[in-house]
Image (cartoon, coloured by chain):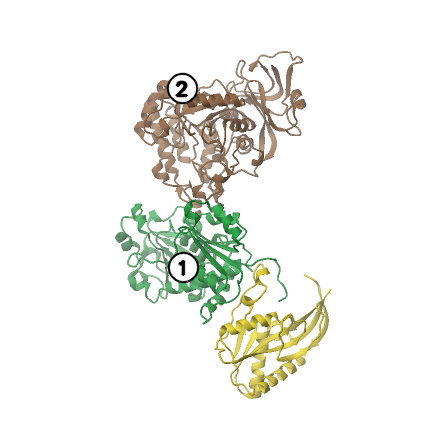
Amino acid sequence: MFKCKNLLGLQDLSAEEITFLLDTAIPMKDIISRPIKKVPTLRGKTVVNLFYENSTRTRSSFELAAKYLSADSVNISSSSSSVAKGESLYDTARTIQSLGADVIILRHPMAGSPRLLARTVDAAVINAGDGAHEHPSQALLDLFTVRERLGRLAGLKVVIVGDVLHSRVARSDIWGFTRMGAEVVVCGPPTLIPPGIDRMGVRVFHRLEEALPGADVIIMLRIQKERQQQGLFPSLREYAVLYGLNRRRLALARSGALVLHPGPMNRGVEISADIADGTSSVIEEQVTNGVAVRMALLYLLAGGGDRHENDY
Amino acid sequence: MTDLKEKARILDRDGIRRALTRIAHEIIERNKGTEDLVLIGIRRRGVPLARRLAEKIREIEGSLVPVGILDITLYRDDLSSLHPHPVVRQTEVNFSVKGKKVILIDDVLFTGRTIRAALDAVIDLGRPKNIQLAALIDRGHRELPIRADYIGKNVPTSRRELVEVRLDETDGEDEVIIQEKS
Amino acid sequence: MKMIIRGGRVLDPVSKRDEIADLYIQNGLVALPFEADSSTQIIDAAGRLVAPGFIDMHVHLREPGFEAKETIATGTAAAVRGGFTGVACMPNTNPVADNAAIIEFIKNKALEAGRCGVYPVGAITRGSQGKEMAELAGMRESGAVAFSDDGQPVKDAWMMRLAMQYCKMLGAVIISHCEEKSLVAGGVMHEGYYSTILGLKGIPAAAEEIMVSRDIILAAETGCPVHIAHISTAGSVALVREAKKRGISVTAEVTPHHFSLTDGAVADYSTNAKVNPPLRGEADLQAVLAGLADGTIDVIATDHAPHTYDEKNVEFDLAPFGMVGLETAVGLVWSELVHKGILTPLQAVAKLSFNPASILGLNRGMLTEGAAADITIIDPDLEETVDPAKFAGKGRNTPFTGRKLKGMPVMTIVAGEIKYQRSQKSGVRSRESEVRSQNEGTV
């Protein structure tokens, strides 16, 4: 059973809870592959997508997940609401609560916002990415994809490459993979590796050639051009030379290694086009699995009413 | 948890076997053979029952009937009042139900709510020619207009009683007992 | 008005007096022994510590301009409840305390409130903008005890040098909030493991240490005394220790939160633990404790920074820095420093009374005959759980809610008058207060 009220981050979850979530996503994935992609499970439930940052990908994934489960979903984004008029998160949360939301999915540029929201509302809160903190549903879909493809998580070597400093995906992946017994290595320029990250149970490398040997899974992070403007690395060209994944470097990993990317990709920068479209890449599967994992999350967090089970 | 007291044993191993044999015959007779026939067991104990019926049908008719597994959790009508939500398992129907005669199989027919959910679940998989229902035990107390086409045994019960079907595959023995809440 | 405080352990850091004795007070001053008569107020201080009145040389009273957070009246109420007989208030009000008129305003408001001494700190530069010097001599004349652009540190080294040269002439200390802004760059907590897992922008220790170095160098060059506000890192402590060894006129203060909490207190995105300088790592905390013990750190000051509930009930990045401190400081000093053997009671008293008084040039912090009868009485064994609902100040923004403290101020006397008395079963008893009120509260 999954007894958490909210999903704010993978840091809070045990290996058992993560396994349960992933197991629940299996029947959900079946539903997506059927001609009728809909079950009546969450009829009458209201899911609010509260997005303070643009994210077509994550938002539509959650939206489809809600629709496949027959929940009603509403999108509130920063450009279309009082959010843009400077209403505080606290007041927006109270309003959404009054509208009768059962689940609120929050994407916010500031770390820790989902915790503030969860303290304010009775509805279940799912963190869809908060600043550089966590993006738990992304990490869960990564875990699901890897487990489905490789049959296990324990004992795998997972290499996360790129801008770990600003990446919520990296943090959630580190918590998730290490908790499931995988070995995690991060690799990037020293200016993009946050201090003290080794205490999360990972090893740090600055050279891809040292990080990749023996890798079962390679997670490439998106590099944002604005980081160059902040002076964190000299140029995209130099970044691509040092940290871009190409055929030659992929050959250093274990054969059959998987390549993941949370998207959207910068082809030719962190990942070469032939790798992105190659047989190692599971980037498209990640998208499908994302819907399944989010259906599982919605199903498990939208339970209501009494805390007992009847004799169905 | 309320304490349960075993009250009576209504079917033993042989009783279950005889009931399933009879149901298998009835299914074949009613459907004039096994053409377009598929069996779908409702998790959890409908699944071994479906497999056993398929085996009996093979013994009688010599033909293999496909068996599917249905998990009706996502179709339950009481989800809005349950926390946490029950465990969902996989539905494994690896064949098309379109145009098929679907025999739904469950261990105990009680309120009819499980069957209502199962009907919706099957119809979401495709449009069958018809759906029929087989249950090992019918204990009455229907809350929906649902009846079984094939019944192993009718057992009049009170609401305080609990009918428990135990099968080798799931429980390590074959028997049906009535328990009473004390 | 005559008063005798009987049987307490009298601690006077100047004379190093530490003995059980009676303390006599007459006309608002510490007096020679006299015979009690019917008008003499007798205070039984058996089992209590009797210390010169505590002075918090770093508070934000928020008036003028931010009266929703705190006023001079509520801030001084918090001070006396916390055992302080005097506070030095920082100039980052609105308008900024950068001229004599505002210094006068603050002093008048404090007189009106009538609770404890209020010693205004003037801004170094106009509007604390760091561009041109404020009228320092005028403010000094009106009673500014020191100068600081607290919170808006003087960025330009040239400007700071000029201010020091000028202050040297005035005989006033410069209080420096040490922060190199280009290294802070939007940081909201200490840079380290916790900032990494929380995904919050970190403030490196170097941001503080670079400025500590600069100001020590300028102090050495100009001869102007510099006081390092709220020191928080191991590197800063080492820099101050070294500077003192070289005879440079530098002093330093630490806040109770920096000697009792680490950045782990932020782990739940608790905005009440968001403070500047940020709560640091364990090694920094240990260095601060060592600095307190060996005298590198002269003063304990709270950086009392009240904010409203709504201001703090927001995303961590958006919450203002700062926490209240006046009403928990003494309890934390005794719980974390005295009872744990890091400071003797006499050393703790010195860092809370005589040392800040002498840095600010105040004739306070002593119990010798003729000294002002500002007195703090402490029950070192009194245990109390921090409950912000009981605070006399307006701010409730403390990370110490629910923390059990041992060693609390039980009576605050300003110029011979009881300004606060803590109600408790076995409290300090005075004949007068028994008739007057059994309830806790400011008098």
**Chain ID for brown:** C
**Chain ID for green:** A
Residue underneath mark 1: A157
Q: Is residue A115 visible?
A: no
Residue underneath mark 2: C140
Quarter-wise, where is residue C100 in the image? top left
Q: Position of residue C92 (x, y in %)?
A: 42, 30
**Chain ID for yellow:** B
Q: Are marks 2 and 1 in contact (CB under 8 Å)?
A: no
Q: Position of residue B114 (x, y in %)?
A: 59, 70
Name which residue type carries label 1: Lys
Q: Position of residue B121 (x, y in %)?
A: 53, 71
Left/right of residue C311 with respect to residue C403 in the rendered view: left
Quarter-wise, where is residue C137 in the image? top left
Left/right of residue A294 with respect to residue A238 in the rendered view: right
Left/right of residue C336 with respect to residue A216 in the rendered view: right
Q: Single out the mark in the foreground, 2 or 1.
A: 2
For this rendering, which residue is in front, A177 or B127?
Answer: B127
Circle 2 marks a residue in which chain?
Answer: C
Query: Which image quarter holds the N terminus of chain A?
Result: bottom right
**Mark 2 and mark 1, same subunit?**
no
